[in-house]
Image: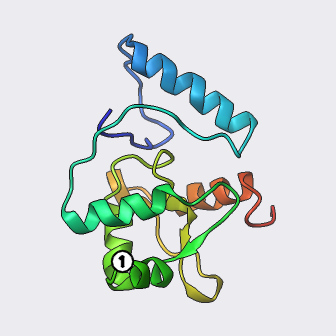
Amino acid sequence: MQRLDFLPPDTALHIQPHPLLDELCEQLECYWQVPAFRFELPYTLQGTAHQLNVWREISGIPSGSVRRYGDIARKIASAPRAVGQACGRNPLPLLIPCHRVVGSAGALGGFNSGRNGFDWLPVKRWLLRHEGVIAGE
């Protein structure tokens, strides 16, 4: 697996049967039922050395926890904005849980960099509520 995208709600799906897709669907069901579920799927990442460093750091954030862009930046000797840009280019959201990276002073930050011309921040909010990080509204 190299990419996993959220799609706008009105997207028509054309699913081709594949064992990896079946396994992804099963694991997504487990995550919807148990927010602490840890995905175990094979994947390959392609990106810059900086992006790979950021994605490696993000991969270690457990469900129910968050890290700040600035904290990750300090850990890998980078800048918060560069960490945010790498998060926005994350090809495997959920598997590499970029929704668990937030801004300072309680700001959520961005999510999925407006892919497909859609505002994905409500999805980030939902995921963080699902994992018990923020209270339901």
Local crowd at mark 1 within 10 Å, few (<14), some, or many (≥20)? few
x, y percentage for residue 71? 50, 82
Q: Which image quadrant for residue 74?
A: bottom left
**Given the image, on which type of amino acid does mark 1 rest?**
Ile
Front position in the image: 115 or 56:
56
**From the viewer's perspective, is residue 104 above or below residue 112?**
below
Residue at 73 percent of width and 58 percent of height: 129
Which image quadrant: the C terminus? bottom right
Question: Residue 31, percent across and down?
Answer: 66, 37
User: Which scheme is used to colour this image of the protein?
Assistant: rainbow
**Quadrant in the rendering for residue 87:** bottom left
Q: From the viewer's perspective, is 15 left or right of 64?
A: left
Q: Looking at the image, which residue is at 33% across and 49% down?
A: 91
Please give the name of the residue rendered at 66% of the width and 54% of the height, measured from the top-left corner.
63
Tell me: 119 left or right of 125. left
Q: Position of residue 23 (x, y in %)?
A: 50, 21
- The residue that mark 1 highlights is 76
Q: Nearer the viewer, residue 122 or 45?
A: 45
- Coordinates of residue 45 in the picture (x, y in percent): 27, 46
User: Residue 38: which quarter of the image?
Assistant: top right
In this view, 68 is above or below 116: below
Q: Which one is nearer the viewer's eye here, 86 or 13?
A: 86
